[in-house]
Image (cartoon, rainbow, N blue to C red):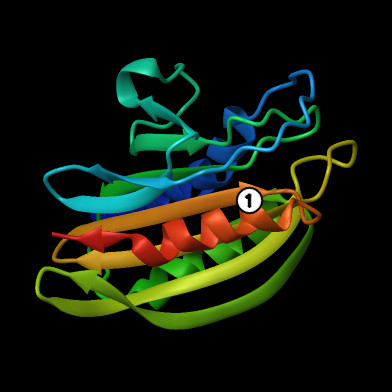
């Protein structure tokens, strides 16, 4: 019983940390309204691949500050700096006893409701994710909320995938009125994620 409670607390801690990562990856920068013609490149590890805009910044684990959870293995940040919030994507991996990614989405939703102000679920749906020569089930949840009353509303899209005992969470974050091209890049990144 204690082991089960400990694992549940660890899962809740992990899910709450997923919501804070995008907020930590942004920064206050001077705004440069420059048009960037972006093409994509493939970011690959031994376990997955994802297409990213060539002009987005890649942040590897060795570049993370101590406030980024250890489960985060890579992050991508829009190179066009915004003084309010920079669109970003991160990938986190953890061990899990869950077998259905929709259960992970439900836990994350419950945590988001308590950790974000003005939480609003937009959509949750099951999708197919490439895995080896086939596909596996993933759950995509879109929602928005604020970290504090003084901060801007942030829109999140999280893709949850479970293969074996490993849970992958791809978290995207951007302003609700983000440039349409940036939102398209984010959607393409989510759609391109594939397990090997």
> Residue 163: percent from the left, percent from the top?
18, 66
> Residue 83: percent from the left, percent from the top?
80, 27
Residue 9 or 110: which is nearer the viewer?
A: 110
Residue 156 appears in which quarter of the rendering? Answer: bottom right
Q: Identify the residue at horizontal 34%, vertical 26% (top origin).
A: 60
Residue carrying label 1: 182
In this orientation, does residue 165 appear? yes
- In this rendering, the answer to whether 158 lies above or below 100 is above
In this orientation, does residue 8 appear? no
Q: Identify the residue at horizontal 72%, vertical 59% (top origin).
A: 144
Rendered-image quadrant of the N terminus? bottom left
Q: Identify the residue at horizontal 66%, vertical 31% (top origin).
A: 80
> Residue 158: percent from the left, percent from the top?
50, 60
Judging from the image, what secondary structure is the residue with disc 1 in? helix
- In this rendering, the answer to whether 79 lies above or below 65 is below
Rendered-image quadrant of the C terminus? bottom left
Q: Identify the residue at horizontal 57%, vertical 46% (top origin).
A: 19
Residue 108 or 172: which is nearer the viewer?
A: 172
- In this rendering, the answer to whether 8 lies above or below 80 is below
> Residue 129: percent from the left, percent from the top?
30, 73
- In this rendering, the answer to whether 64 lies above or below 135 is above
Left/right of residue 55 with respect to residue 34 in the rendered view = left
For label 1, the crowd category at 10 Å Cα-Cα, with few meaning under 14, some 14 to 19 and many 20 or more, is some
Q: Residue furthest right?
A: 150
């Amino acid at each position: 019983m204690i082991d089960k409670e400990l694992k549940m607390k660890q899962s809740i801690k992990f899910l709450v940390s997923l919501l804070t990562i995008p907020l930590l990856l942004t920064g206050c920068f001077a705004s440069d309204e420059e048009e960037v013609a972006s093409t994509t490149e493939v970011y690959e590890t031994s376990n997955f691949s994802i297409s990213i805009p060539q002009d987005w910044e890649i942040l590897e684990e060795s570049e993370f500050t101590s406030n980024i959870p250890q489960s985060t293995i890579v992050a991508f940040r829009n190179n066009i700096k915004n003084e309010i919030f920079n669109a970003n994507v991160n990938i986190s991996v953890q061990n899990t006893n869950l077998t259905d990614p929709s259960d992970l989405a439900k836990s994350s939703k419950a945590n988001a409701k308590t950790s974000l102000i003005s939480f609003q679920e937009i959509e949750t749906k099951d999708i197919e994710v490439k895995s080896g020569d086939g596909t596996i089930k993933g759950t995509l949840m879109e929602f928005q909320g604020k970290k504090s009353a003084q901060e801007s509303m942030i829109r999140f899209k999280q893709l949850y995938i479970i293969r074996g005992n490993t849970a992958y969470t791809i978290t995207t974050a951007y302003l609700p009125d983000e440039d349409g091209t940036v939102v398209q890049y984010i959607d393409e990144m989510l759609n391109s994620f594939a397990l090997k």
